[in-house]
Amino acid sequence: LFSETEQDKIAQAIEDAEKATSGEIRIAIDKHCESDPYQKAIDYFYKLDMDQTAQRNGVLIYLAHADHKFAIIGDSGINKVIPKDFWDTTKVAMTAHFAKGNLADGIVAGVSLAGEQLALYFPPQHGDINELPNDIVYVDDLERK
């Protein structure tokens, strides 16, 4: 789905965003989503232990590319402090890229916007560690395990 360059670009966007925050951002890529993408995102949020961050400030971007569906969700810590329409406005920014066929750029836009909010409310902490990997999770691979 993504070239090596695009995968590196996404991983770099996550790394850059996380340098300015104690929050964690992950990407889950699926081929199909026959149900509600928001519900699938919630399912993978828990499967990927995104709810285990110390400050409950994980963000997951879930994309089912073949079905043109996606969702972006945050854990309870970030959802308490961000503007109520933040995830919707982030989806609009991402959709603008997706509509042009630029999936990687859309994901990078979502990561960047989420990172900005995380940095505002969850600055880096002394001794902060990267709690979760920055690589893209391909759901097909996850399901086979």
Image (cartoon, rainbow, N blue to C red):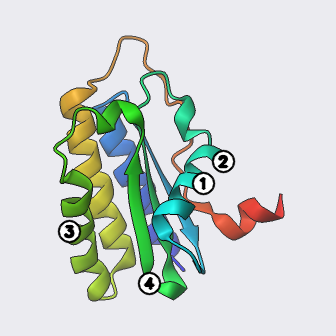
Return the mark for residue 47. Answer: 2
Q: Quadrant of residue 51?
A: top right
* Mark 4 / mark 2, whichever is N-terminal: 2
Q: Choose the circle earlier in sequence order: 3 or 2.
A: 2
Q: Secondary structure at mark 3?
A: helix
Tag 1 and tag 2, C-beta contact below 8 Å: yes
Real-space Cα distance between discs 3 and 2? 27 Å
Residue 50 placement, left or right of 97? right
Task: Report how far apart the C-alphas of labels 1 and 2 lie in the structure.
Answer: 5 Å
Which of these two is toward me, 141 or 20? 141
The answer to whether 63 is drawn above or below residue 121 in the figure is below
Which quadrant holds the N terminus?
A: bottom right
The percent position of residue 70, horizontal first and vertical second, equals 42, 71
Give the residue type at disc 4: His
Give the residue number, with chain letter if any, for mark 4: 68
Looking at the image, residue 35 lies above or below residue 24: below
Labelled disc at residue 44: 1
Label 1, label 4: how far apart the Cα atoms are: 18 Å
For marks 3 and 1, give the CA distance: 23 Å
Q: State the residue at coordinates (63%, 65%).
A: 138
Q: At label 1, which amino acid type do we have?
A: Tyr
Crowding near pointer 1: few (<14 within 10 Å), some, many (20+)? Answer: some
- Rendered location of residue 11, percent (x, y): 45, 54
Q: Pointer 3 and pointer 1: residues touching (CB < 8 Å)? A: no
Q: Amino acid at mark 3?
A: Ala
Query: Foreground: 122 or 72?
Result: 72
Q: Which residue was labeled with disc 3?
A: 93
Q: Secondary structure at mark 2?
A: helix
Q: Position of residue 131 (x, y in %)?
A: 53, 30
